[in-house]
Amino acid sequence: MSDRSPTLLWLRRDLRLSDHPALRAACARGGAVIPVFIHDDAVAGLGAAAKWRLGLSLADLEKSLAEHGSRLILRRGPALEVLRDMAAETGAGAVYWSRLYDPQAIARDRAVKEALRDDGLEAKSFAAHLLFEPWTVQTKDGGYYKVYTPFWRAVRDRAVEEPAPAPGNIPAPGTWPSGDRLEEWQMGRTMDRGASIVRPWQRVGEEAAQGRLGWFTGQVIDDYREMRELPAEDGTSRLSQNLALGEISVRRCWHAGLRAHQHGAAGAGPWLQELVWREFAYHLIYHTPRLAEANWRPEWDGFPWNTDGAAPRVRAWKEGRTGIPFVDAAMREMYVTGYIHNRARMVVASYLTKHLLTHWRIGQQWFDSHLTDWDPASNALGWQWSAGSGPDATPYFRVFNPETQLKKFDPDGAYVRRWIAEGQRAPSETALAYFEAVPRRWGLSPTDAYPVPVVGVKEGRARALEAYENRNF
C-alpha cells in the first residue's frame, strides 16, 4: 500500500478534534482521512440514557468535522466486518483508533488489530482516553496498585504531555464512502418522553466542554474542596459526561487544573486527585477485569444480598420513593438531568447495598441505564467501593446515615426541595419535571403523599451490621 492511501479513523470514545493523537497521526500519514463511527454490539448494549447522549455527541461531531471539510461516516455491524468492507471500498491502507480499557473493548480491539494486520493493513491504536497507560503504573514489586493513595503518590508528579490543537486541515478523499444517517439509528428511542426533560442539562460537544472547563477553573475551582460536597451548589466541573465520550481530553483537564494549582487555587489539588481517581478506576478494570461484573473481593461471593431487582423495596429505590429524602432527591436528580452529584451517589449506593442489603450489580445496571455520564470503569468502581466488595472500598461496616449526611451537606434543605415535590405548596420546576421524565406506568403524581421509609435509617443499619457480623470478611 502507498503511504498516500487513505486512513480509516475509527472513532469510539474520543469524539473531539483537539488533543486527538490518532487523528493527528492519520493526517500526518499523507493520504485522505475517513472518520468512521460503528454501531456495533458495544453501542447496541448501552443503556438508554448513555446511548441517547452518545447520539447527541455524534451529531455535534458531524458538524465539527464538516467545518473542517471532513465527514463522519456512520456504519452499523460488527467492527471488524465494517472496517474490512470500508478498507476494500476506499483502498485504505491503515486503520487508526484510540485505546479503550474495559474488558469488552479490549477483546474486540485485539481481535480487530490482529485480523487487520493479517489482511496487510496497518492497524494502530493510540493513547488518548487516560493520563497514564495502565501498564505503566506499577508498584515497586512490578504489580498493580490496589489502593488509591499509593497510586496517587506514584503518578502525581509524572509529566503529562500538553494537549495538542486540532489539525488545521483534515485531508478528504476524492469520493466519500456511503454511510447511514444518524436519524436512522434512533439513538434516543428508548428514552421516550424523558429525552426532552434531560436535554437542557447536557453540555454537548467539544466546544461546550472546553467552555465549562474554562468557567470551572476560572471561577469555581478555588472553592472546590468545600463546594464539591454540597449537592445543591454548582460547585463541581460536571465534565464527567464529556470525559466519558471523549468530547474533552483528560490531559486538557489536567493541565488546566495544574495551572490553577500553580496560581494558588486551593481546590485545584483535590480536583486533580479526582481526575486521578478516574485513572485508578481504569487501572483496576484493566488489571482485574472482574471489577466490571463480579465482586472484586471473592470473599463477598457468598454474601446473602437480595438479587431480586423487582422486589418492592428495590422498586421504591429505583423510583425515588424510599421515604428517605436524600436518597429520593438524588434518584430524581438522575431522571431529570442524567446526572447525580457524587456525594449523593455514595448515599444512594450505600442505602441500596447496606440498608436494603441488595446486590450492587442491581444498582450498577440501573445507573448504566439512566446516567448520561455513564463510564464502565468509574461506575463499577463506585458501586463496589460503596458496597464494600471492591478495591480501596469503604469499610464494609461503614454505613452512610442519609439523615446525618443530609444535615451536613444540605443543611437548609435546598437540594431536597429542588427535587422532591410531594408536600410542597409550590414545588419547583425541577421537582415537577421528575414526574414528566419517569415512565407513565409508574403512576406517580406530585399530589401523592410522600412515602414513609421502606427501611428506616436505624433499622437498616442494624440489619446490615448483623449480616456483616455473621460473615468472615
Image: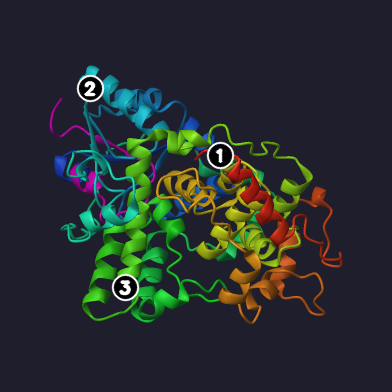
Picture quadrant of residue 297? top left
The residue drawn where x is 22% and y is 48% is 21
Q: Is residue 224 magenta?
A: no
Q: Give 240 or 181, whichever is nearer the viewer.
A: 240
Picture quadrant of residue 157? bottom left
236 over 36 or under it: above or below: below
Label at residue 100? none
Q: Is residue 16 magenta?
A: yes
Crowding near pointer 2: few (<14 within 10 Å), some, many (20+)?
some
Q: Secondary structure at mark 2?
A: helix
x, y percent for residue 367: 58, 48
* Residue marked by disc 2: 117
Which badge, 1 or 2, comes first in the chain's sequence?
2
Q: Secondary structure at mark 1?
A: helix
* Residue marked by disc 3: 268
Question: Image quadrant for the N terminus?
Answer: top left
Which badge, 3 or 2, comes first in the chain's sequence?
2
| Magenta region, main secondary structure | loop
128 over 87 or under it: above or below: below
Q: Give 173 or 219, whichever is nearer the viewer.
A: 219
* Residue marked by disc 1: 185
Q: Is residue 315 visible?
A: yes
Specify the amino acid type for callout 1. Trp
Q: Give 453 or 415, whichever is nearer the viewer.
A: 453
Q: Secondary structure at mark 3?
A: helix
Crowding near pointer 3: few (<14 within 10 Å), some, many (20+)?
many
x, y percent for residue 405: 59, 69
325 over 127 or under it: above or below: below
Q: Is residue 473 toward the left or the right of residue 282 in the image?
A: right
